[in-house]
Image (cartoon, rainbow, N blue to C red):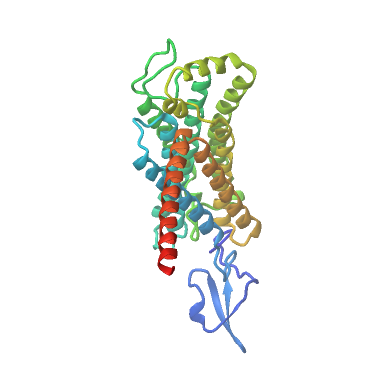
Amino acid sequence: LANGTATDIETPFNKKIRKSCDECDFHGTTFCENITVGFVCHCKEGWKTSANVAPLASALALSTHQIIVKFVKAILLIYLPHNEQDPQTYYQDSRSFALTIAGFGVLLFRQPTLFHLSYLDCKWVFYVITASYLLGLGFFAAEALNALELITLQQPNSWITRFFNHETRDAELAVRTVVPIIVVASGLLTILAATYTKATSSWSCLGVFSAETIDLWSPIFLFAMCLALIATAFSYRGLFIRKHLPHYQMKVEIYLNSIPNGEKNTIEKRNLIFTAVGPWLMLLSYVTLAVSTAWVTASFANTLAIVFAALYGACNLIQSIFTTPEAIYKEDLGRCDALYKDYSSAIDKCLRLVIAIDV
C-alpha cells in the first residue's frame, strides 16, 4: 500500500526482518537486502511492510452495517407487513443501497493490483464509489425535505395523500429519485472531465491527496458539502418551525388524532435530528476513508477513518430504531412476551414432570 507520489524513493521505516525475499511485495519494493539475520524489504515512498487495515475496516463496517439493518427490517416486514412503503423508508433504503455499493467497491477495488485493474478501470472505480457517497448525501437531502413537508402541513409522509388543499403529485417518486441521480452523475462527470488524470494512482483507486490534486478534490468536497448543507438546512427549518411555530404542530396532531394508530406511527417519525447530523458524519467517513487509503503511513488518518465510520454506523442504526413505527415495537414486544410465557409454561411443566418421576 502506498502514499504520497508515485516516485520510487526508498522509505527508511518498517524494515521488518523477513525469512526470504519472496515475502517482499513486488509493487512496493525497490530491492531486497540480505543481512546476517535474514532479509529486509526496502519499500518505495509511502509503502510499508504491514497491512493498512483502516480503509478495509471502515468499508467493512459500512457494508455490514447496512446489510444487517436491511436484513432485520426485511424480517420485520415478513411478520409485520405494511400496506405501502412511506417516502422516508424509501429514501433510507435508497441511501443504504448506494452506500452498500460504495462499501463493496472499497473492499474489492480500492487497491488496483488486487484484481489487476487497468488505468481506465481504476478511474471508473473512483467514479462509482464517489458517486455512491454523493448519492447517499442526495437521498439524505430528499429525506430531510420529506420530513419538512410533514412539519409544514404539505403531506403526511405519503406518496399519495396530501394535507388540506395541496394537490397530489403522481410523479413525485420518480422525480425525487431521478433528480439526485442526474445531479450527482452529471456534476461528478463535469468535475472529472478536466481532472480525470489526477483521480487515481498506481496504489489507490480512491484518489491521491497532494498539492497537485487540489483542483480535483476541492470541487468534489464543495459538491458534497452543498448536498450535506441542503439536508441540514431542511432539517433546521423543520426544527425551527416545530419549536417556534407550534400551531403547525397542533394541526398535525389534530390530523393524527383522526386516523388509526398504525398510520399515526408511520407518519409521526422523529427524523429531523438525524437528517441534520447524519450527512456530515457520512461526508467525514468518506473523506477520512479516501485520505487513509492514500496516506497509509499516517496513523491519524487511519484512526479517523475507523472512528467516523463507526460514528456514522451508530447514527444510522439509532435512526433506524427511532424512525421505526412504535406499533412495530409494541406488537413485537407483545409477541416476545407471549413467546416467553409459552416457553416458561413449557419449562415449568417439564420441571414438575421431572420432580414427579424422582419422587
- At 62% from the left edge and 49% from the top edge, which residue is drawn? 211
Q: Residue 43 in the image: x percent, y percent?
A: 57, 71
Total tally of numbered discs in the picture: 0
- At 56% from the left edge and 16% from the top edge, which residue is drawn? 250
**Residue at the outermost bottom position:** 36
**Any part of residue 48 in sight:** yes
- At 60% from the left edge and 19% from the top edge, which residue is drawn? 241
Q: Does residue 237 lie above or below 116 as drawn?
A: above
Q: Does residue 47 lie above or below 335 as drawn?
A: below
Q: Residue 222 in the image: x percent, y percent?
A: 57, 37
Q: Does residue 77 lie above or below 156 as drawn?
A: below
- The image quadrant where one finds the C terminus is bottom left
Q: Residue 233 in the image: x percent, y percent?
A: 58, 27
**Residue at the outermost top position:** 165
**Any part of residue 215 in sight:** no
Q: Residue 99 in the image: x percent, y percent?
A: 45, 45
Viewer-closest of 46 and 133: 133
**On the picture, is 25 further left or further right than 90?**
right
**Residue at the outermost front position:** 359
Viewer-closest of 4 and 296: 296
Q: Does residue 156 lie above or below 338 as drawn?
A: above
